[in-house]
Image (cartoon, helix red, strand yellow):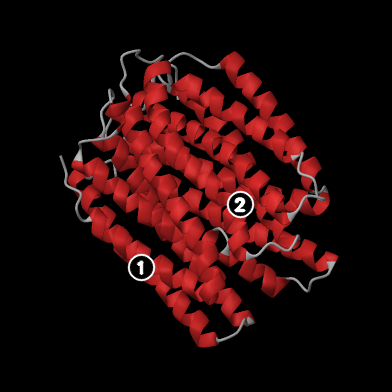
């Protein structure tokens, strides 16, 4: 790409993407560190889900507020705040005392995870909103840029899952958390010093009530997003990792280490595949040649295509009756298929929210949309621990199938402008 053909907003887009990558690497690693570390301490599936509840609640509140904060104070302010708060959360988590009671540990980790949830959604809203403002106006340009940002972010988060599991096995909990805090602090400093121009600085007359959209498409898409991401997290957060741990570990220290690596590897591969398909989605959907009306209709079709995958997997688990090698292989293969189709759904949603909004409202609508995203993750997180405790991984997967079906119904309400 020559200087003459380079999009004007490219330097700022690259800086925002690099900062988002760094954040999501630590976010993925932290999730795996917390999940596996506290599982080995004897936490139940419901207690493990509680550790992430405030993280998701914080996301719901933060996204509503972050859209207004960014509109008022500028996107760079919210991006820097997200990175800085994540550093503080990592440093706080390193203060966890193994001598504390389970109740005290749960409350403390919930609070720290809540701060991390605020940090993540500040960074996410800033990055996604920036794409709308910086992307080239050519046909398919917006879809390509948002797909690249979202897809690469999820690939990096997948590496974070693997990093977190590996660090826990090799270095232990506290050294891993402190090391990530130090690296992220250096990246924050570099971004602050080298951020190019190109992002808006905000407008002082922005009103909080503007966050709530009157656009029916934005509202229906947000509803579809709630149940779509709930359908992923209902098995992803607690159910599958704990099921695989039960199958792969013999309870010894060496067995635990091996299980950590295998679980982290699966979560990493799943998320990297998810990110890769997201990045490829504009080409798969021929976004540069199809009218927007076709892409709006495709949102419902791809949700329907996803619905059957978790239902089939749930039926296999119920039919098996007990863990078996063939069942583990089938679950891995089936969930990878789920990840690929889920990625197309997610990429379509991420494009459509930016297509439906305007430059003047972008931070507000994106904040509202990602509030719905966080609400879906919260719902999925709560249901993950509960359904696994009540009916094992089969009930997690069956619940996921029902939720994807609801997402298809909501997507069917979308209309082209």
* Residue shown at 43% from the left, 72% from the top: 398
User: Which residue is label 1 attached to?
Assistant: 402
Q: Position of residue 411 (x, y in %)?
A: 25, 54
Discs 2/1, front:
2
Question: Taking 263 as reference, is 60 above or below it?
Answer: above
Question: Taking 98 as reference, is 192 above or below it?
Answer: above
Categorize mark 1 by other alpha carbons within 10 Å: few (<14), some (14-19), many (20+).
Answer: some
Q: Is residue 284 left or right of residue 192?
A: left
User: Which residue is label 2 attached to?
Assistant: 51
Q: Nearer the viewer, residue 197 or 51?
A: 51
- Image quadrant where residue 24 sits: top right
Q: In this view, does 229 lie to the left or right of 187?
A: left
Q: Where is residue 151 in the image (x, y as percent from the top left)?
A: 47, 44
Q: Can residue 56 be seen in this view?
A: yes
Q: Where is residue 406 in the image (x, y as percent from the top left)?
A: 30, 62
Q: Can residue 160 be seen in this view?
A: no
Q: Nearer the viewer, residue 89 or 145?
A: 89
Q: State the quadrant of the N terminus.
A: top left
Secondary structure type for disc 2: helix
* Residue shown at 35% from the left, 24% from the top: 133
* Residue shown at 60% from the left, 84% from the top: 322
Q: Position of residue 335 (x, y in %)?
A: 50, 66
Q: Which of marks 2 and 1 is nearer the N terminus?
A: 2
Instruction: Tell me the CA gap for discs 2 and 1.
Output: 25 Å
């Amino acid at each position: 790409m020559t200087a003459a053909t380079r999009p004007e907003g490219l330097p700022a887009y690259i800086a925002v993407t690099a900062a988002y990558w760094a954040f999501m690497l630590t976010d993925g690693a932290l999730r795996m560190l917390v999940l596996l570390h506290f599982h080995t301490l004897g936490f139940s599936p419901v207690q493990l889900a509680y550790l992430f509840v405030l993280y998701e609640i914080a996301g719901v509140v933060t996204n509503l507020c972050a859209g207004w904060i960014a509109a008022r104070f500028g996107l760079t302010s919210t991006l820097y705040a997200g990175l800085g708060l994540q550093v503080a959360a990592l440093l706080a988590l390193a203060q966890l005392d193994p001598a504390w009671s389970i109740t005290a540990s749960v409350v403390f980790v919930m609070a720290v995870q809540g701060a991390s949830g605020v940090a993540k959604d500040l960074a996410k809203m800033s990055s996604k909103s920036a794409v709308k403002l910086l992307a080239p106006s050519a046909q398919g340009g917006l879809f390509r840029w948002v797909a690249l940002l979202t897809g690469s972010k999820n690939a990096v988060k997948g590496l974070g899952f693997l990093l977190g599991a590996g660090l826990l096995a090799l270095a232990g909990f506290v050294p891993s958390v402190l090391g990530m805090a130090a690296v992220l602090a250096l990246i924050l400093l570099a971004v602050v010093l080298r951020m190019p121009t190109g992002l808006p600085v905000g407008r002082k007359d922005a009103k909080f009530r503007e966050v709530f959209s009157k656009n029916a498409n934005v509202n229906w898409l947000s509803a579809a997003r709630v149940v779509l991401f709930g359908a992923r997290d209902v098995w992803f957060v607690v159910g599958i990792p704990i099921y695989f741990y039960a199958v792969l570990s013999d309870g010894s220290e060496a067995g635990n280490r091996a299980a950590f690596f295998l679980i982290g590897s699966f979560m990493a591969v799943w998320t990297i595949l998810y990110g890769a398909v997201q990045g490829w989605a504009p080409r798969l959907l021929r976004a540069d040649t199809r009218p927007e009306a076709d892409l709006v209709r495709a949102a419902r079709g791809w949700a329907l295509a996803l619905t059957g995958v978790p239902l089939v997997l749930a039926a296999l688990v119920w039919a098996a009756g007990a863990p078996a090698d063939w069942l583990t292989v089938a679950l891995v293969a089936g969930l990878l298929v789920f990840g690929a189709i889920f990625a197309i759904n997610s990429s379509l949603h991420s494009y459509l929210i930016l297509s439906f909004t305007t430059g003047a409202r972008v931070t507000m609508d994106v904040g509202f949309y990602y509030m719905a995203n966080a609400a879906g993750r919260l719902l999925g997180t709560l249901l993950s621990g509960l359904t696994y405790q009540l009916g094992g991984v089969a009930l997690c997967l069956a619940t996921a199938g029902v939720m994807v079906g609801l997402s298809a119904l909501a997507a069917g309400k979308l209309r082209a402008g």
